[in-house]
Image (spheres, helix red, strand yellow):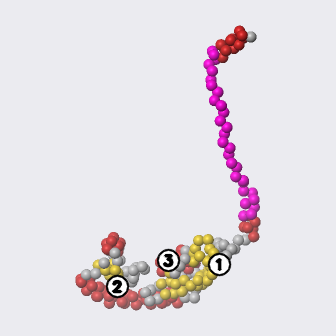
Amino acid sequence: MQVILNEDYPSLGFVGDVVKVKPGFARNFLYPKKIAIPVTTESMELFEHRKRQLQVKKAAKKKDADVLKTKIDGTAISLEHAATADNKLFGSVTLTEIHDKLKGAGIELDRKLIRLEAPIKAIGVFDIEIKLHQEVSAHVKLTVTKKADSQEEKEAKKLAKKSAPKKVVAQEPVAEEAVAEVPAEEVAQNEEKKEETA
């Protein structure tokens, strides 16, 4: 099924693009949120008129994206992560971490604009693409370093290991033999019998 996008949608395309989507996705998501409209002769004619208006808006958005690109390009950010001795990260660098660092550097943008080709799972320097517009991309240099444990933290870890309580295994309780309760009358009779025989 083909639809015309009313808004930019990262995984599909940009405003004015005619894209092919599954009918359920269009019916249940794109149409109710007014992100897209169905392709019909009426909508195509209507959209031709809107296309001229959109080109003006697109040009303004591109201009804004170019301004933001000049601000972003050349920015360098760094992250510290826990890593193994052979410089592999425990986990990976997330988009949220990159977004937070950019925000800390004074760059406000939507997290969805940040593009990673593959998860970052090692220490090093990486080039991160930020897709600002259909035709404009900015690049940020990300340096991932190993989180340094201070000498005090290392000593505290060693002490914690040494002073950790050893595992204590609980023994199962020994079952006591069941003692049959004997009525007091029987005990008295047994004692009388013992006295008679003695």
Residue visible at 24% across and 84% down?
A: 41
What is the C-alpha distance between the residues marked 1 and 2? 43 Å
Predominant SS along the magenta part: loop
- As drawn, is 157 to the left or to the right of 186? right
Q: What is the secondary structure assignment of the residue under circle 2?
A: loop
The residue tagged 3 is 111
In this view, the residue in front, 179 or 44, is 179
Q: Is residue 136 visible?
A: yes
The magenta stretch is 157-186
Q: Position of residue 114 (x, y in %)?
A: 50, 80
| Circle 3: residue type | Arg
The residue tagged 2 is 16
Q: What is the secondary structure assignment of the residue under circle 1?
A: strand
| Circle 1: residue type | Thr
Residue visible at 32% across and 88% down?
A: 51
**Between disc 2 and disc 3, whose residue precedes?**
2
What is the C-alpha distance between the residues marked 2 and 3? 23 Å
